[in-house]
Structure formats: C-alpha cells, structure tokens
Image (spheres, rainbow, N blue to C red):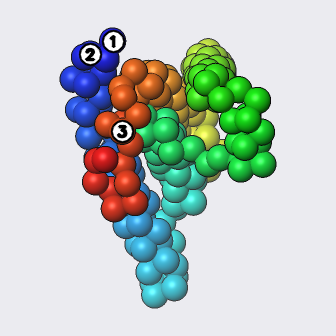
Amino acid sequence: MRNFAKVALPPILSVIEALCALLIFVMMILTFADVVGRYVFTAPIFGAAEMIQFLLAMTIFAGLCLVNAHDTHITVDIFEARLERLFPYLRRYLVQGFSVFVMAIIAVEMTKIAFETHELGSITVVLEWPLVIVTSAVAFLSVVSLIVQVLGLALPKHSAHQDDTGDML
C-alpha cells in the first residue's frame, strides 16, 4: 500500500491543486466582472451569485482533499493532551480512524444527495441548471478526499506533510 500511495498520491494532488486554483480564479474573475458590471454599467451578471456558490462548494471539497492528504486538519488542543496521556500509542490511530470514518460518512451522504438530485431532476433556483452537476461534483470530490486521506495515511508521516512554506518535509 505504501508504494502505491507514493506513486498514486502526487499526481492526484497535483490535479486537485490545479482544480482548486482554477475554481478560485474563475470565482475571482466572475466576482470582478459582476462588480464592474453592477457598479459601472448597472448591468450585473445574471446568476453570478449562484454560480459563485457552486464554485465555492466545489472549492471547499477540493480543498478538503488536500487537507485530508496532508493531514493538516484543525486540531483542538484541549483533547490532544488528554488523548496523548491516556493513549500514547493509540492516539494517532484513534484520531485518524475517526477522521476516516467521518469522511466516509460525508462521501456516502453526498453520493446519496447526488443520486437524489438526479432522480428528482432538481434544478437551481435562479439559473435553472440541473443541480446534479454540483452535487455530483461535490460527491466525487468527497470520495476522492476519502481516497487520498487513506493514501496519505499509508505514507510515513514526514513525506505526506508540508511545512509552512509549502515545501515537502
């Protein structure tokens, strides 16, 4: 599993990083164009807020892939010391096991929602686009997030993490 993770994880994360950058760039351009259109030409882009909401949802779940792969979750120090004291050797496995379990629940539920929006033929409120586009993208990204989290755990702790400058440790 470790060798597979070493080979498979970097290209997946490169694609996810590029996707995050693209989504944020599109949100930035759309927001800029909408603001200029609204205040300079008094003609905002129709449905811009809805499009930005969709882009934001996809950006969040794409970013979650990176957080899970690098194990850079927000931690609560209140529990960390107690867990370390009570279960010094099991703490990492308990925390990671819980994290994988929760990510699996998110992936399953998002997939259910994607199938449900497809079956119901749900559409967006303003643009009347099929909602399945966004829900299936988020479901896919949540499944990828679960996969890269498990692959990241298979690697030695130092190779799956980056320092504050973004360089691999």
Looking at the image, which residue is at 36% across and 39% down?
158
* Residue pointed to by mark 3: 158
Q: Amino acid at mark 2?
A: Phe
Circle 3 packing at 10 Å, graded few (<14), some (14-19), many (20+), is few
Q: Position of residue 143 (x, y in %)?
A: 49, 23
The answer to whether any part of residue 121 appears in the image is: no
Q: Secondary structure at mark 2?
A: helix
Label 1 with label 3: CB-CB less than 8 Å: no
Estimate the spatial distance between the alpha carbons at disc 1 and disc 2, rounded to whole Å. Answer: 5 Å
Looking at the image, which residue is at 52% across and 29% down?
142
Mark drawn on residue 21: none
Q: Amino acid at mark 3?
A: His
Label 1 with label 2: CB-CB less than 8 Å: yes
Looking at the image, which residue is at 62% across and 48% down?
74
Q: Amino acid at mark 1?
A: Met
Q: Is residue 106 above or below residue 19?
A: above
Q: Secondary structure at mark 1?
A: loop
Q: Earlier in the sequence, mark 2 or mark 3?
A: 2
The quadrant in which residue 163 appears is bottom left
Mark drawn on residue 1: 1
- Number of numbered markers: 3
Q: Earlier in the sequence, mark 1 or mark 3?
A: 1
Circle 1 packing at 10 Å, graded few (<14), some (14-19), many (20+), is few
Estimate the spatial distance between the alpha carbons at disc 2 and disc 3, rounded to whole Å. Answer: 17 Å
Q: Position of residue 92 (x, y in %)?
A: 59, 29
Mark drawn on residue 4: 2
